[in-house]
Image (cartoon, helix red, strand yellow):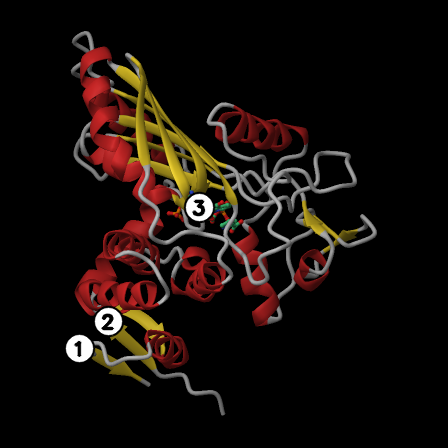
């Protein structure tokens, strides 16, 4: 019988465990802390397609020599409202944090600024990138392209990545309004999770290696491809994400980089784009109240919940009870760490 034991870890303990795995696999202390916090935040909020499930992929990519865990990003001041960052073949999140102080300085001066990151690897959810801007009072929008696994609308060959778009806005009296969604019918991570669990996907999700519609996640992973969400409309968003994340930043398109010489590489080598706005500029002090107002109208009209609500409920539960991990996942992480990390198991359920 399968062992259904669940282990609950505190956020700090999960970060410590993940950080030790990154460091043991060639990531600098500084970058490892950033990546560990990012991955633990995803797991804590129930963003499971980009939580600890991704650690094997991170490690595989690092060990293939495809991504530089020790990269030190270079920040370029290229205009009154324009910051570029060369991630130097490293992960995007340290590059974003390196560019953030100059970006914020420019937003304070001009009311709006953009951040264009190139030569970067993004292997996570996008909401952790935008939510902190809204917590600091800014509106933020970010897009990132990934690896070619999405066929354009009516097309036959995968060109786009799953190309997510995330948006965050301050909201009076509540946590920021945040949405974060792939421009494909579902995220690639969720296809992998469905394949492992033996679940079928919804119709309209993808095609098999012959271009025929399929609900089988394995057929999508095995030479098939995903479809954009919403037909031609999602298609245009996926294309916009390629333009902003690659053409504008100087990074690769999703189908352009060549990782064939790096067996085990999994992290897409592309770019990421941000636009950050001070919504109160010019005396618009009611902005956050207005956002709360439209959100309330939507709920009063019958929408069951807003994007981000599920994450916050999951986060609150994790902060109270610890972050739940199956015993198997926990043991896999311990194996990856290969050394004893002082973890306090707060609660064990069977
Ligand atoms: P989902 O479809 O699960 O969710 C998309 C958004 O819709 C979320 O903000 C979610 O909020 C919200 N939402 C979901 N259900 C409802 C509902 N019933 N009512 C109101 N709002 C709802 O996400 P995707 O599968 O499209 O993407 C999953 C993750 O994969 C994202 O975090 C994305 O960034 C990541 N990703 C990363 C890529 C990369 O290259 N790094 C590539 C592609 C995807 P909530 O979270 O609260 O449920
Ligand atoms: O889930 O589609 C995805 C994805 C691609 C890159 C990182 N996550």
> In the image, what residue occupies the spot 56% across and 62% down?
264
Is residue 52 visible in the rendered structure shown here? yes
Closest to the observer, 337 or 240: 337
Mark 3 Cβ inside 8 Å of ligand 1: yes
Give yes or no for contact between labels 2 and 1 (Cβ–Cβ under 8 Å): yes
- Asked if disc 2 and disc 3 are in contact, CB closer than 8 Å, the reply is no
Separation (CA) of disc 3 from disc 1: 30 Å
On the question of residue 176 being in view, the answer is no
Marks 2 and 1, the one that precedes in the sequence: 2
x, y percent for residue 50: 42, 56
Label 2: few (<14), some or many (≥20) within 10 Å?
Answer: many
| Label annotation for residue 122 | 3
Secondary structure at numbered mark 1:
loop
Looking at the image, which is closer to me, 348 or 31?
31
For this view, does 92 lie left or right of residue 100? Answer: right
Residue 52: x, y in percent? 38, 64
Which residue is denoted by mark 1 in the rendering? 344
Label 2 belongs to which residue?
9
Q: Against 88, is 346 above or below?
A: below
Q: Secondary structure at mark 2?
A: strand
Say if 208 sits above or below 264 in the image: above
Q: Does the Cβ of the disc 2 residue fall within 8 Å of ligand 1?
A: no
- Dot in front, 2 or 3: 3
Q: Is the C-beta separation of discs 3 and 1 under 8 Å?
A: no
Task: Look at 31% across and 19% down and name the residue there.
Answer: 113
- The residue sitting at the bottom extreme is 1
Q: Quadrant of the C terminus?
A: bottom left
Quarter of the rendering containing residue 24: bottom left
Asked if the beta carbon under badge 1 is closer than 8 A to the nearest atom of ligand 1, the reply is no
What is the crowding at mark 1: few (fewer than 14 residues within 10 Å), some, or many (at least 20)?
few
Residue at 35% in and 51% down: 310
Place residue 314 in its image quadrant: bottom left
């Amino acid at each position: 019988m399968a062992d259904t034991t669940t282990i609950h870890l505190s956020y700090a303990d999960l970060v410590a465990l993940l950080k030790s795995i990154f460091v043991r696999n060639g990531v600098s202390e500084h970058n490892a802390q950033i990546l560990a916090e990012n991955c633990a935040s995803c797991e804590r909020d129930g963003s499971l397609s980009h939580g600890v499930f991704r650690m094997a992929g991170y490690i595989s990519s690092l060990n293939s020599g495809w991504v530089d865990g020790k990269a030190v990003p270079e920040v370029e001041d290229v205009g009154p409202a324009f910051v570029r960052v060369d991630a130097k073949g490293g992960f995007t999140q340290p590059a974003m944090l390196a560019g953030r102080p100059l970006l914020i300085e420019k937003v304070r001066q001009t009311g709006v600024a953009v951040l264009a990151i190139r030569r970067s690897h993004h292997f996570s959810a996008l909401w952790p990138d935008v939510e902190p801007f809204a917590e600091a009072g800014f509106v933020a929008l970010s897009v990132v392209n990934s690896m070619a696994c999405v066929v354009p609308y009516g097309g036959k060959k995968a060109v786009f990545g799953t190309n997510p778009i995330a948006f965050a806005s301050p909201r009076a009296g509540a946590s920021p309004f945040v949405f974060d969604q792939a421009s494909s019918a579902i995220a690639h991570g969720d296809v992998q999770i469905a394949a492992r669990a033996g679940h079928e996907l919804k119709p309209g999700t993808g095609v098999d290696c012959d271009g025929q519609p399929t609900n089988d996640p394995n057929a999508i992973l095995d030479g098939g491809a995903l479809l954009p969400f919403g037909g031609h409309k999602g298609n245009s968003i996926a294309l916009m994400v390629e333009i902003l994340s690659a053409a504008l930043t100087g990074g690769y398109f999703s189908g352009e980089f060549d990782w064939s010489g790096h067996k085990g590489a999994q992290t897409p080598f592309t770019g990421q784009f941000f636009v950050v706005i001070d919504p109160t500029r010019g005396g618009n002090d009611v902005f956050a109240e207005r956002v709360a107002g439209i959100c309330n109208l939507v709920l009063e009209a019958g929408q069951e919940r807003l994007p981000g609500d599920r994450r916050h409920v999951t986060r609150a539960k994790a902060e109270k009870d610890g972050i739940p991990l199956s015993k198997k996942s926990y043991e896999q992480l311990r194996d990856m760490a290969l050394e004893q990390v002082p973890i306090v198991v707060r609660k064990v359920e069977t």
